[in-house]
Amino acid sequence: MTSSDAEFLEFAEAARLPLVRTARLLTGDWHLGQDLLQVTMMKVYLRWGRADRWDSPVTYARTVMVNTYCTWYRRRWRHEVPSERLPDNADAGDAAESVVTTDVLARALAGLPRRQRAAVVLRYYDDLPVEQVAAILGCPPGTVTSLTHRALIRLRRSPELLDDMAGER
């Protein structure tokens, strides 16, 4: 193993958890999120020799991830039908509530257009500044603000979130 490979493995281990969470929220599916992360890491690894030119390897990986996600969903096989029924979960208590909350959020995010969804996930879940999200999405900061604003309006009107909020009252 070369030192470059060792550096990549160190990066991959450190960046894995935040990137898999981002991938999960982008795709709305745990398994597709894992696939997206694997493809992203493969693409980053193939360009790892140029890592010294990147401002941040994590930012570069997020850019690759969002671009890959957008490409996937342009070509996505449309014959899958999401199920309204959640699988039985052996966990109880807070873990089960967390799964339901995550599922509600994923369904609400799934109703957004790709770029709005990416902007919201990067801005609020990954807590990135507007300028960094703009760099990742390849657009001006004003576009990120506009995408985020429109996405938040749609999320506030989302039936999934309205039902969930009504249940909490």
Image (cartoon, helix red, strand yellow):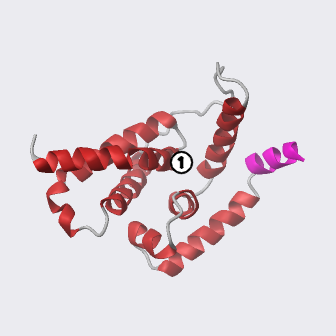
Q: Position of residue 42 (x, y in %)?
A: 25, 45
Residue 88: quadrant of the picture: top right
Q: How many marks?
A: 1
Work out whether 164 lies above or below 48. Answer: above
Residue 121: quadrant of the picture: bottom right
Q: Residue at x 56, y 56 (%)?
A: 125
Work out whether 119 lies above or below 34. Answer: below
Q: Mark 1: which secondary structure?
A: helix
Indicate the amino acid at tag 1. Leu
Q: Position of residue 81 (x, y in %)?
A: 58, 33
Q: Residues within 10 Å of mark 1 (few under 14, many from 20)?
A: many
Work out whether 77 lies above or below 128. Answer: above
Relative to the observer, which residue lies in front, 118 or 90? 90
Q: Look at the image and give the residue range highlighted in magenta.
A: 159-169
**Residue that numbered label 1 is attached to:** 25
Left or right of 76 in this view: 124: right
Magenta-colored stretch includes residue 136: no
Q: Position of residue 110 (x, y in %)?
A: 59, 48
Most distant residue in the left direction: 2
Q: Main secondary structure of the magenta part?
A: helix
Q: Residue at x 69, y 30 (%)?
A: 96
Left or right of 96 in this view: 118: left
Left or right of 74 in this view: 106: right
Relative to the observer, which residue lies in front, 80 or 136? 136
Q: Position of residue 157 (x, y in %)?
A: 76, 58
Q: Residue at x 60, y 68 (%)?
A: 148
Work out whether 34 lies above or below 51. Answer: above
